[in-house]
Image: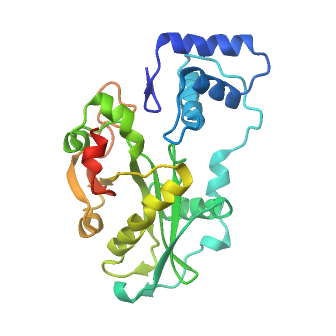
């Protein structure tokens, strides 16, 4: 049973059931940590993959495989990130040549994450949704003016064109998948208008992403991926920033178990973050 990029055996699911039944008052975070310790499910930096495990447990709970204890502090996650403040109101158009911008990027730390989420929910066509796994958010600014927002998070578990291009088998993908990161959001604010600015921003952020990821998670990512809805976008800015288009998705989505193909078809783009990316991913 695959959840959060890991296959859970029936014996492991039963172990979780037994832990819940025998541990009165245990909360969901403790169940996740205990299971990760039991099976030694760890991140590349040695820490427990507790958040990935909590996502997996919640999916099992919703599918009726296990019964988790009630959440101790329920809240409306959607309303927390969809409320509107004056900080994200539309602004007057900013129009000039891409080369005239004095760009710099900043990691959105804890105090700024809520603002980042609000911008994304207000102006990105996909809206706000929680990022998967390890993650990092960026603001791209000129002086104090926010121009664009990007995020990188856990890579897709598998996609045939990408995996063929890399050349790894299932066992190497399972081991080395954390070394891939997914550009899960890219938003150039709608009042910012400059030809080629998006590709400049991509190049700027990708140049510092490996160092920021190393500092936060203790390891160096090797390859970035992204998925572009081909009905909406041509992927021009990725092509201009030297990303490689390696194929298309099948429109199935990760939860399509019956081959419904009800998701938009997306082009798959990759960007090497290390010269030895292929050798190391296939090691």
- Pick the quarter of the image with the C terminus: top left
Q: Position of residue 253 (x, y in %)?
A: 35, 37
Would residue 127 be visible to someone looking at this image?
no
Q: Is residue 135 left or right of residue 265?
A: right
Q: Position of residue 148 (x, y in %)?
A: 47, 71
At a point 25% along the width and 45% down the height, the residue shown is: 279
Residue 241 against residue 159 in the figure, above or below? below
Image quarter of residue 188 = bottom left
Q: Position of residue 43 (x, y in %)?
A: 51, 38
At a point 51% along the width and 10% down the height, the residue shown is: 11
At a point 52% along the width and 85% down the height, the residue shown is: 92
Task: Decide which of 3, 181 is in the foreground and name it.
Answer: 181
- Pick the quarter of the image with the N terminus: top left
Task: Decide which of 146, 12 is in the foreground and name it.
Answer: 12
At a point 35% along the width and 51% down the height, the residue shown is: 222
Task: Decide which of 126, 73 is in the foreground and name it.
Answer: 73
Would residue 37 be visible to someone looking at this image?
yes
Image quarter of residue 233 = bottom left
């Amino acid at each position: 049973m695959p959840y959060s990029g890991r296959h859970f055996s029936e014996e492991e699911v039963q172990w979780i059931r037994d832990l819940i039944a025998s541990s009165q008052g245990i909360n969901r975070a403790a169940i996740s940590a205990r299971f990760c310790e039991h099976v030694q499910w760890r991140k590349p930096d040695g820490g427990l993959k507790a958040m990935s495990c909590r996502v997996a447990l919640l999916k099992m709970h919703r599918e009726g495989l296990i019964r988790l204890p009630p959440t101790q502090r329920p809240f409306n996650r959607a309303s927390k990130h969809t409320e509107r403040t004056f900080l994200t109101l539309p602004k007057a158009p900013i129009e000039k040549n891409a080369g005239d911008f004095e760009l710099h990027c900043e990691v959105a730390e804890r105090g700024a994450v809520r603002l980042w989420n609000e911008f994304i929910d207000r102006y990105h066509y996909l809206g706000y949704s929680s990022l998967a796994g390890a993650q990092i958010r960026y603001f791209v600014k000129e002086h104090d003016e926010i121009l664009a927002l990007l995020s990188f998070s856990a890579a897709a578990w598998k996609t045939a064109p990408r995996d063929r291009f890399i050349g790894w088998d299932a066992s190497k993908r399972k081991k080395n998948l954390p070394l891939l990161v997914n550009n899960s959001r890219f938003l150039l604010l709608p009042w910012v208008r400059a030809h080629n600015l998006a590709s400049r921003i991509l190049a700027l952020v990708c140049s510092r992403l490996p160092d920021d990821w190393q500092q936060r998670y203790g390891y160096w990512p090797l390859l970035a991926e992204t998925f572009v809805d081909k009905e909406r976008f041509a992927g021009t800015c990725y092509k201009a920033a030297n990303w490689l288009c390696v194929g298309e998705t099948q429109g199935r989505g990760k939860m399509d178990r019956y081959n419904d193909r009800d998701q938009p078809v997306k082009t798959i783009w990759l960007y090497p973050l290390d010269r030895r990316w292929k050798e190391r991913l296939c090691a």
